[in-house]
Each structure stands twice: as structure tokens, then as C-alpha cells.
Image (cartoon, rainbow, N blue to C red):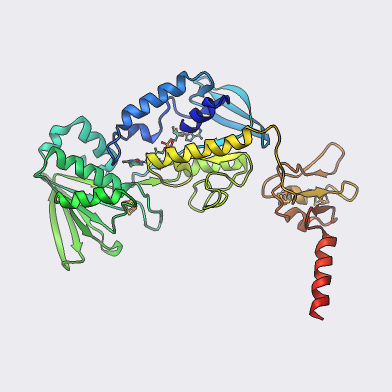
């Protein structure tokens, strides 16, 4: 939404495609940030501004069904609304901001016992039912639930600060409450560290556990009991708790990123997030020109970081939209139609689906789409393809020079 607003404010027409009936995503369920921002109000203002913007057309209950074209001139087919009305949209760039999923693994009695919650559940409970927090004596939080383990080796990045945020809010409501945070290490990076220190100052107990000695949760009628092993004390602990709060984090939306990566021919990382072109130099651009990334579709991020990423995506998109032309790279593949036997090898070999057999019956490569990887040139049995800047005679001349120097 932030990327859409920035582009629309610059005068560009934006189509915002949302698969749900309402805008907001997971951020709409977060109540406050660690820094104390009122996320609920921010989100409702943002949704209203986006929906009333003259340059933004919001398409809800929408699914992308087809896509073609080249950077600067894409055509995408969308089915939208309860009746799945089909429409085509012409657009110059695409920003992928499909987010990730809130992880809810069936661990530590989550889903079986109402007293076991996630940090997101606790975030809402503190706001909606402060009385229940005031009546609690002891709460145990367990970090890295469903993260940093074989099925999902990533750190979710947001759950340590989410735990500290909720611990501080619970302490504000009920200063006598004892809060134990069982963790593998606390990852409150940057200025979040100040809040971690504040939580320690207020008496929140941080206890480390090792992955091979995980805590266990037992349900009793009058409360929960958490068994843990304290590495520093070198002994077993048994902590009774009115509630256990699990820091469950984020996981990639594998189904969505797979569908969209097949449709748009954009790459994904091994862990099913969309992949940026270069982690340091082009963290918002994708390797397919005209595609940009924003938010947790790329990797776990906080709301502030997701907003910054969205703004960065809009800025990068603007650099394309502001021009009436596109500079193409010089290293692109070119087909000699007279040599082509239309064997389809290049059509199948290209990782970006660029070559196609044209009406004249030979392979054609659109230089605007070609990435210059050279795979088709190497595979063509008829030697009908040359990669510009790396043509056969150029490579052979270089090799000749090299051999001459060696002799
Ligand atoms: C348990 C948990 C606790 C968190 N706590 C905090 C916190 O305390 N502080 C904080 O700053 N951040 C927190 N976060 C992170 C925060 O939720 C994210 O930073 C934020 O939601 C990312 O926004 P986004 O727009 O990238 O993705 P999302 O909010 O996930 O939005 C993505 C949108 O894309 C839509 N979509 C998905 N696929 C498609 C498709 N194929 N076609 C069309 N639309 C599609 C979705 O319906 C959704 O509306 C938490 C996250 C979780 C899971
Ligand atoms: S942010 Fe903290 S709780 Fe979440 S996965 Fe990383 S280390 Fe574990
Ligand atoms: S050079 Fe690479 S990207 Fe270009 S058409 Fe050949 S295989 Fe596809
Ligand atoms: S691999 Fe070579 S011969 Fe076969 S279709 Fe492509 S360009 Fe033509």
C-alpha cells in the first residue's frame, strides 16, 4: 500500500491486487509496535487513503491468472470479485508484496489448550482483555517456536522484539507479574536492544535453552507447567504459568510464491521467498527487469522495515516509469534465422522462457527480455545463436592470444 501510494502520488496509475476481501494483510492484526506506534490506527488510515486515491484501483478477491509482455509493457489477466470477473491490465512495472504466513506449528499444546497463545494472540489480548492480564501471576514465553529448526532454519527476526514488546506491556498492566522468556539467544537488533535492557531492568527473566534440550509444557487443571533446563545454573526448572506465549514467527507462503514465480518467471530462494537480484546492491529489484519486491514476500521483516522496503520498491519502479525508453544490456542472444532448424532446444533451455518460434518458422529472442546468460547459445546444435559481446570469433580470438602468450 505504501508503494502504491508513493507511485500514485507521482501521477502513475496503480492497480492494487489483493486476494482477500479486505486490504491490510498480517499488519492489520498487529496492534502496536515495540516503539509504541498505534498500528491499528495507522492501518485504517492507510487503507482509507489508498481506497480513496483517484489514481489507485483496488481489486479485492483477485487472482492473477495470466501474464505476458516485456519490461515497460506487461499485460496481466486478473479474475476479481465474487463473480471472478476477468479483466486485463496493461502496466509498465510489477511490485510483488504478497507477504508471508504467520507460523502456527502444533507444538507446546498450541491449538489444544486455550492458555497457550502466540505473540500475535497475546498482542490482541493485552489490548482487548487487560483484566485477564492483571489477574495473571506468572507467564512463560518460549522463543524460536517453528523457527531455527530443520523444517524452517530461518530466524523469523520479528518474534524476539514481539516478545519484549508484550512483556513490557504486561509489566505495565501488572508490575508484580513474573515473566520468564525461554530463549536460544535474544535477537533484538539495533535500537531494539534498549527495550531488551528495559525488560531486564523491570525484572523479566531470560533463561537460555539449547535446541537439544527444549522446554516441555504440561497442562494441569489449575494452570500450566513448563519444564526447562537452565544451562547457566546447570539444573532443571519447573515453572508454573497462567499462560504460555509462543514466539512463532513467519514462514514463506510457498504456494503463492511458487504460483507467481511460474507465472512471472521470477526466481525464489531455497526457502520459498522471492529472491532479490543482489542482496547488497539491488535488494529491491528482481532479476527479471521490471519486477520489484516489497515487505515480507522477500524475507521476514518488521512493519517499519516492510514500509521502508515498499518505499524503496516504489523509488526503483519510478526510475523505470519516469523514462520513455529502456536501455538494454549489450550482452543479449541473437538468432541467425537462416541457420535455425526450429528444434526447440533453446525454447526449452532458456530459464526465462524468452525464445519462441516465430511466424517465419525460426527461433526469435526478444532483447528486452533476454538476460544474456548464454545457455541457449551453448545448447543450440545448429550454432544459430550468438551471445553479443561473447561471440564465437571473439572468444576464439581471445583464446588464440592467450595461447600465443603462453608459448
Ligand atoms: C506472529 C507475528 C507477529 C508480528 N509482530 C510484529 C510486531 O510486533 N511488530 C512489527 O513491526 N511487525 C510484526 N510482525 C511482522 C508484520 O506482520 C509484517 O512486517 C507485515 O505484515 C509485512 O507486511 P507485508 O505487506 O509485506 O505483508 P502482509 O502483511 O502479509 O500482506 C500481504 C498481502 O498480500 C496479499 N496476498 C498474498 N498473496 C497474494 C496473491 N497471490 N495475490 C494477491 N494478494 C496476495 C495478502 O492477502 C495480504 O493482504 C509480526 C508478524 C507475525 C507473523
Ligand atoms: S527473532 Fe528471536 S524468537 Fe524469532 S526466530 Fe529469531 S531468535 Fe528465535
Ligand atoms: S541468453 Fe539466456 S536469457 Fe537470453 S534467451 Fe538465451 S537462455 Fe534465455
Ligand atoms: S536451438 Fe538453435 S536450431 Fe534449435 S530452435 Fe533454437 S536457435 Fe533454432
Residue closest to the far right: 338
Q: Is residue 354 left or right of residue 1?
A: right
Q: Nearer the viewer, residue 250 or 298?
A: 298
x, y percentage for residue 382?
A: 85, 55
Residue 127: x and y, percent?
22, 32
Identified at 76% across, 42% down, the residue is 366
- Answer with the quarter of the image where residue 151 lies: bottom left
Count numbered badges in the picture: 0
Q: Is residue 269 visible?
A: yes
Report the quarter where the C terminus lies.
Answer: bottom right
Q: Is residue 66 left or right of residue 341?
A: left
Q: Is residue 84 above or below residue 197?
A: above
Residue 39, percent from left and from top: 32, 32
Residue 274 spot, x, y in % from top left? 52, 46
The residue furthest bottom is 407
As drawn, 340 above or below 170? below
Q: Is residue 109 visible?
A: no
Residue under the point 75% across and 49% down: 330
Which is more toward the observer, 35 or 341?
Answer: 35
Decide if residue 157 is on the left or right side of residue 79: left
Q: Residue at x 87, y 38 (%)?
A: 360
Point 69% across, 32% down: residue: 324
Question: Quick check: 270 above or below 42?
Answer: below
Amino acid at each position: 500500500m505504501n508503494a502504491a501510494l508513493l507511485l500514485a502520488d507521482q501521477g502513475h496509475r496503480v492497480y492494487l491486487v489483493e486476494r482477500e476481501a479486505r486490504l491490510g494483510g498480517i499488519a492489520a492484526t498487529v496492534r502496536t509496535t515495540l516503539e509504541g506506534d498505534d498500528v491499528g490506527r495507522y492501518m485504517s488510515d492507510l487503507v482509507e487513503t489508498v481506497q480513496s486515491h483517484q489514481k489507485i484501483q483496488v481489486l479485492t478477491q483477485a487472482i492473477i491468472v495470466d501474464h505476458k509482455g516485456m519490461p515497460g509493457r506487461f499485460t496481466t489477466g486478473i479474475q476479481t470479485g465474487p463473480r471472478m470477473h476477468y479483466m486485463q491490465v496493461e502496466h509498465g512495472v510489477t511490485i510483488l508484496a504478497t507477504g508471508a504466513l504467520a507460523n502456527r506449528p502444533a507444538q507446546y499444546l498450541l491449538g489444544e489448550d486455550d492458555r497457550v497463545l502466540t505473540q500475535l494472540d497475546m498482542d490482541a489480548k493485552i489490548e482487548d482483555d487487560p483484566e485477564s492480564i492483571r489477574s495473571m501471576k506468572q507467564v512463560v514465553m518460549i522463543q524460536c517456536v517453528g523457527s531455527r529448526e530443520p523444517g524452517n532454519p530461518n530466524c523469523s527476526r520479528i518474534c524476539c522484539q514481539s516478545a519484549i514488546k508484550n512483556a513490557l506491556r504486561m509489566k505495565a498492566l501488572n508490575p508484580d507479574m513474573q515473566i520468564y522468556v525461554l530463549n536460544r539467544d535474544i535477537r533484538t537488533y539495533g535500537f531494539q536492544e534498549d527495550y531488551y535492557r528495559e525488560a531486564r531492568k523491570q525484572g523479566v527473566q531470560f533463561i537460555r535453552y539449547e535446541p537439544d534440550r527444549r522446554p516441555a509444557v504440561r497442562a494441569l487443571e489449575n494452570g500450566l507447567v513448563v519444564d526447562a533446563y537452565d544451562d547457566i545454573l546447570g539444573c532443571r526448572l519447573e515453572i508454573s504459568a497462567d499462560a504460555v506465549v509462543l514466539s512463532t514467527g513467519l514462514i514463506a507462503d510457498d504456494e503463492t510464491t511458487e504460483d507467481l514465480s511460474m507465472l512471472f518467471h521470477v526466481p525464489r530462494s531455497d526457502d520459498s521467498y522471492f529472491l532479490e537480484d543482489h542482496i547488497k546492491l539491488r535488494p529491491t529489484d528482481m532479476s527479471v527487469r521490471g519486477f520489484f519486491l516489497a515487505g515480507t514476500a522477500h524475507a521476514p521483516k518488521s512493519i517499519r522495515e516492510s514500509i521502508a522496503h515498499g518505499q524503496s520498491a516504489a523509488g526503483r519502479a519510478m526510475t523505470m516509469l519516469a523514462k520513455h525508453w529502456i536501455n538494454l544490456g549489450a550482452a543479449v542472444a541473437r538468432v541467425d534465422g537462416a541457420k535455425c532448424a526450429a528444434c526447440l532446444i533453446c525454447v526449452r533451455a532458456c530459464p526465462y522462457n524468452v525464445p519462441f518460434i516465430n511466424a517465419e518458422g525460426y527461433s526469435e529472442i526478444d532483447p528486452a527480455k533476454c538476460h544474456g546468460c548464454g545457455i541457449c547459445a551453448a545448447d543450440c546444435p545448429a550454432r544459430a545463436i550468438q551471445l553479443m559481446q561473447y561471440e564465437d570469433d571473439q572468444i576464439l580470438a581471445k583464446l588464440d592470444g592467450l595461447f600465443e602468450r603462453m608459448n
